[in-house]
Amino acid sequence: MPVTITVGLDGTGHSVAAADWAAHEAVRRGAELRLVYAWAWRAGDTSYVGDREAEERMVRAVLGDAESRVTAAHPSLDVSAELVVGDPVPTLVDEAARARMLVLGSRGYGTLAGYLIGSVSLHVLRRTTRPVVMVRETHPDAPAPRPSGDVVVGVQDAETAGGPVLDFAFGAAAERGVPLRAVYAWEVPPVLMWSPGSMWVAEQQGGLEPVHRRILADALKPWREKYPQVEVVEQVGAGPASEVLLSRTEGAQLLVVGRRTHEPGVRRLGSVTHAALHHAPCAVAVVPHA
């Protein structure tokens, strides 16, 4: 049964960019492309024209334009488009559950996460159990990610590395035929920072970095064996995880990060994922941990 890649449209240029990205991904994977506009009419809402029939016509026009655009670019692609009447967040969460991945548009750079990716996208990211790829519209003056660029994955906790995150990242690199850059950040333990003598002992024993390199290598080993065709570049850096990770994304075409559940029933994105969504120069795939 063919897999499906679903795009959530909202009438913005960012969602058009998401549709373009998803169409390329569907062709690459031999998947079907589904375009969805989740729409709920609210009386008195003046976001469009304040008229239900007129607003529905506009929504259907957005769907039709997107379908025509991706079909013209990829004539052999199996494309479907549907207006789904319902609140956007639960509708998109349900759509994601039936798809290989959900692709949404991101508003670009900003300082507030809610402003950056929109409240709908933020809630969907927190609630879905499927990978969500956030794609921003490329600014005319900004350098576009290179199609030949590698895939970068942030290994936030190498000792308990999440299988779904690494599996998605290795699979994406394999589909593209590009290297995978696995990035792991570590910080000097506070006890060593406050104890020069302990730091000296650690350095005499070879330093802390080799230890973390081994941790990363061990975490990647099962996935290297599963995807032997993928060239893997292992990078370990000392410092805050978000800074270390983002410093390795130049020229990348995709950044893969995890989303951890901290408490039963409570899902948060985490500071590294927020930073990636804010500042990564490429598409960002957010993959829930198992």
Image (tube, grey):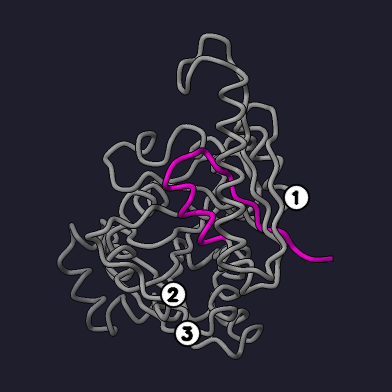
- Residue type for callout 3: Val
* In contact (CB < 8 Å): disc 3 and disc 2: yes
Going from the N terminus, do you reach mark 3 or mark 2 first? 2
Tell me the quarter of the picture where residue 28 sits. bottom right
Give the percent coordinates (x, y) of residue 73. 55, 66
Find disc 3 in the rendering and name its residue. 232
Residue 98, numbered circle? 1
Q: Where's the C terminus, which quadrant?
A: bottom right
User: Which segment did they paint magenta?
Assistant: 1-22
Give the percent coordinates (x, y) of residue 242. 32, 57
Decide which of 37, 215 is in the foreground and name it.
37
The residue depicted at 26 percent of the width and 40 percent of the height is 111
Separation of disc 3 and disc 1 at Cα? 31 Å
Find disc 2 in the rendering and name its residue. 182
Disc number lying in front (3 or 1): 1
Q: Where's the N terminus, which quadrant?
A: bottom right
Tell me the quarter of the picture where residue 254 sits. bottom left
Mark 3 residue crowding within 10 angstroms, few (<14) / some (14–19) / many (20+): many
Give the percent coordinates (x, y) of residue 116. 36, 40
Q: What element carries label 1?
A: loop
